[in-house]
Image (tube, rainbow, N blue to C red):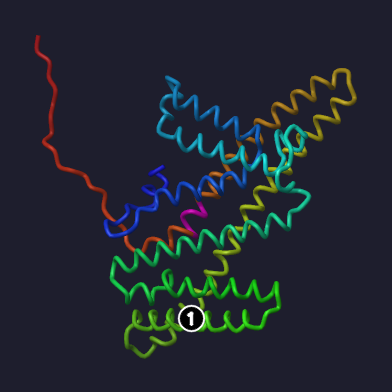
Amino acid sequence: MRPLVATYATVPYRDVDPTWFAAVSYLFMFGMMFGDVAHGLAIVAVGLAARYGHGRLGRLRAAAPLLLGAGASATVFGLLYGEAFGPTGLVPTWWLRPLEEPVTLLVVGVAVGAVLLSLTTVLSIVNRWREQGAALAFFDASAVPGALLLLAVGSIVLASATGASWAWVSAALLAAAGLTLVFVGLLVRAGGHGGAIAEASVELFDTVLRLGSNLISFARLAAFGLTHAVITTVVWQGSTVLWGRGGWLLGAAAVLFLVGNVVAIALGALVAAVQALRLEYYEIFSRLFTDYGRPFLPWHIPTRRTETP
């Protein structure tokens, strides 16, 4: 799973290596957007072929763990959604059907984003402390101030749900503390010139805007999960309609079912893989990394092999 991180950056020696966190979060997000038991097992089959196959498939051996993990995650979410080649009824629904409860799925997607951002912030606090000590940890927007702003958002949600006045007060205090720390850090970074306050104010607004967009961005976990469910539903319903008319349309139904599912797997897997990577890099890694390391490339004496008769 290390290429998930190495493709973005080389982890500095002082930072926490986020490979395990990146791997688990990536597989979770992929499965949520590609939840289907049959399609997930198809990805698992490709992963097994890559792991034990030869020839062209053998060249994908390094990607086998990623394929196996992604397929297993999609299979689990397929059981949660009750999807196997779409809403065929082949498996029970353990949680909800995406097309029947889209709002719930969207809320859960944003909630998943909030959890991942919170865990990311914890790692960021550790990284900032290791990099430059308490000063950076307490005044960098990705560290302690970011944690306070996320807690403020959580307090706002709690206050909206329960109407508790203390939750509103808590949200205001947390937000004020977080914004103050961010502003002080930006002000120090801007220097003592005349436009430092204006520069820090603009960057403070950008920080708040980015936090909101980061949270909302995770709604795509539900959006693309719904898209995949729509595609498989259309294929299944079209196939059953043709099959029900009998005659030569039985063959057309079989072709539609086969081709439709192949397209759904290829398109859905590609979209889920790209979107999960996008969330990983832009929403998570952009907070974890403020500096990049250099890969260790040991020097060696060049050698040349020659053969003599």
Q: Position of residue 169 (x, y in %)?
A: 60, 84
Residue drawn where x is 46% and y is 46% of the image = 23
Tell me the magenta residue range: 278-283
User: Is 288 positioned to the left or the right of 305 in the image?
Assistant: right
**In the rendered view, does 102 fall on the left or right side of 296?**
right
Say which residue label 1 marks.
179
Label tally:
1
Q: Is residue 228 left or right of residue 214?
A: right
Compared to residue 37, the image places residue 216 above or below, namely below
Q: Identify which residue, 259 or 211, lies in the foreground.
A: 211
Q: Is residue 147 above or below residue 296?
A: below
The disc labelled 1 sits on which kind of residue?
A: Leu
The structure residue drawn at horizontal position 88% and vertical position 18%, both measured from the top left corner, is 247
Indicate the position of residue 16 as horizontal and vertical percent values.
34, 57
| Horizontal relation, residue 30 to residue 96: left or right | left
Q: Please tell me whether residue 149 is drawn above or below residue 89 in the rendered image.
A: below
Residue 24 locus on image (x, y percent): 48, 47
On-image quarter of the C terminus = top left
Residue 281 lies in the magenta-colored region: yes
Instruction: Provide residue 222's location: percent of width, then percent of height.
Output: 65, 53
Q: What type of secondary structure mainly makes up the magenta span? A: helix
Local crowd size for mark 1, using a 10 Å CA cut-off: few (<14), some (14–19), many (≥20): many
**SS under mark 1:** helix
User: Outermost residue, top direction?
Assistant: 309
